[in-house]
Image (cartoon, rainbow, N blue to C red):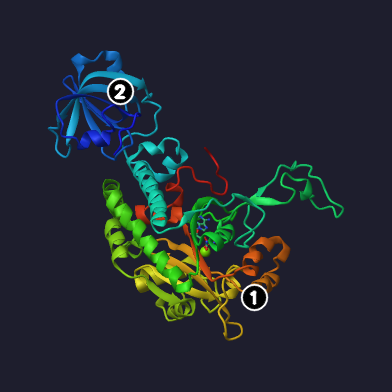
Amino acid sequence: MEQVLTGTKQGSIKQLLASTEYDREVTVRGWVRHRRGSKGVFFIHLNDGSTIQNIQVVVNEENTNENVLNQISVGACLQVNGNLVASQGAGQSSEVQATEVTILGPADSEKYPIQPKKHSMEFLRERAHLRMRTNTFSAIFRIRHAAAYAIHKYYNDRGFYYLHTPIITGSDAEGAGEMFQVTTLPIGNPPLDNQGEIDFKQDFFGQATNLSVSGQLQGELGAMGLGLIYTFGPTFRAENSNTTRHLAEFWMVEPEMAFYEQEDNHNLAEDFLKYLIRYVLEHCKDDLKFLDERFTKENNGKPANERSDMGLIEKLEFVVANDFARISYTEAINILLNSKPHKKKKFKFPVEWGIDMQSEHERYLVEKHFKKPVIVYDYPREIKAFYMKQNEGEEEGRETVRAMDILVPGIGEIIGGSQREDNLDRLMQRMTEVGIPHNELDWYLDIRRFGSAPHSGFGLGFERFILFVTGMANIRDVIPFPRTPGNAKF
Ligand code: 4AD
Ligand code: MG
C-alpha cells in the first residue's frame, strides 16, 4: 500500500498492526473505542478506520497530566506519540507505549451516544452521522468500497467502458411512473398553458424532467457505438415501498453489451456476481469474519423456520462454488403451483401464469426449492418493460419477453435485465400498446433505425448486493445515509 500523508508518518493503524519493526518511535491518531485502567496504567483501544482491529495504546499515569487523562474517553480523538512494541496481550500483534498523548478532540462521555456496548440498528440509524465509528458500520462501508472498486476492475479488465449517463432526464426508462420531478418552476404558482396545464416549456430545461430511475436507455446508445459499456451511478425511485429491500435513492450497476443475446447475458451476470463475491472474500477477510460472527448471533436468535442453515462466509463460498439454477418463468410458476405452501394456501398472494411474482414466491424458489441463486427468464410480456425483446411464435395470451431476474437467498431479486428489442417495428408497436409516444423516445428508436444489432444488459442493485455479502437485514444499513419515504435526514 502507498504511504499517505493523512493519518501518520508511519502509516495507518492497519500498517502498524502488521509491522514487526519494533522499538521505534511512532505517531498514531484515531478515535477511542474503549478504555480501561488501573494502578496508574491505562489501556486505550484506538481505531482510525483503516481496519476493524484497534491498536492498543498503553498510557502510564506518570507520563501524562491529569487533565489529558480525564479527557481520554470513548469517542475522543487522540494523537499518541510512543514506542511500537510487540504486544503482551493475547490476540494482538503490536501496541504503542505512549510517551505523549494529545487530545485532538474531546468527546463528552455523558453525551456521546456510541458506547462500547450493543446498540440496536434503529438507534444507530438515527445517528447515522456517528455510526461509521462502530465495528459493524465501518466493516460494511469498507466492504462497500471494495465492491465498488471490484465492479470497475471487473468491467475494465474485460474491455467495457464506464459511461456516465445523465441523472436528470425526460424519460421514464422502466415505465413505472415512479419518478421524482426536477423543476425550477414555482410550485405554488406554476405558469399554465392554454389548456390550463402546467407549462413546462417555461421550466429550466424547456420540458418536464425527473431524476433517472435507470441509466439503461442511454447505456444502450453507448453500447451501439462503443460495444461494451457499463454505468454505475445513483438512481431514484419514488415508490412508496417501506420495506427492508427498497430505497428511494440507490446505486445501480448497468452493463450493456452489443451482440449479446439472452444466454450471454445470463452468463455474464452469473460470472460478475461470483467475481464480486470472490473479491470480497479475498480482500475483506477481517471485516467479513466480524460480520460472519454477527450474522451467526442474529441467526441463532431467529425462529427455526426463518433461520439460515449456513453461516455468512459459508453461504458466500457456496454461491461461488455452484452453478446458479436457470429456469423459465413458466417452469417457476409450475414449481410454485406444485409447492406445499401453495397447496396448503400458505402464500398470501395467488399463483397463476401471468402474475408478477411476489417476494414470498421468489424466496420459496431460492430458499426452499433450489437453495441457491436462480436465474428466471422469459417472463410474461404484460408485466415487463416495453424495451424487452419479444419471443416469437407464442400461444396467444402467453406472450413472453427475454427478461431475466436473478434471485438470491435472503434477498430475492438482486439483478433485473433482458435482451432488448432490436426490431424497430415491434418496438414501436409495443410503445403504442403501452402508451409511450414515439416522438418522446425518437433518439432511442434511432439506434434501431440505423445499424440495429442484438444487444442485452442488466442492472445490479448495489445495495442489495451489499446486503447479501454483509448478511445485514435492512437495506438502510448498507448505504451511509439512506433515503426512504419520510426520511432524508443528513
Ligand atoms: O429490475 P430493475 O427495475 O431493472 C432496471 O432498472 C433495468 N433498467 C436494468 C437494466 O436492464 N439495465 O432494477 C434493477 C435492480 C433490481 O434487481 C434491484 O436489485 C435494484 O435494481 N432495485 C432497487 N434497489 C434498492 N431500492 C429500490 N427501490 C430498487 N429498485 C430496484
Ligand atoms: Mg426488476
Q: Is mark 2 in CB contact (under 8 Å) with mark 1?
A: no
Question: Which residue is rendered at x = 44% and y = 66% of the image?
Answer: 406
Q: Residue furthest left?
A: 88
Q: Earlier in the sequence, mark 2 or mark 1?
A: 2
Q: Is residue 346 visible?
A: no
Q: Is residue 86 visible?
A: yes
Q: Position of residue 253 (x, y in %)?
A: 48, 56
Between 21 and 331, the one lying in front of the other is: 21
For the residue marked with disc 2, what is the amino acid? Answer: Gln
Q: Position of residue 359 (x, y in %)?
A: 47, 66
Residue identified by numbered label 1: 426
Q: Is mark 2 within 8 Å of ligand 1?
A: no
Q: Is residue 449 left or right of residue 417?
A: right
Q: Position of residue 455 (x, y in %)?
A: 52, 68
Q: Secondary structure at mark 1?
A: helix
Q: Position of residue 3 (x, y in %)?
A: 30, 33
- Circle 1 packing at 10 Å, graded few (<14), some (14-19), many (20+), is some
Count of numbered circles on the image: 2
Residue identified by numbered label 2: 79
For the residue marked with disc 1, what is the amino acid? Answer: Arg
Looking at the picture, does residue 98 appear above or below residue 452? above
Question: Which residue is rendered at x = 35% and y = 61% of the image?
Answer: 274
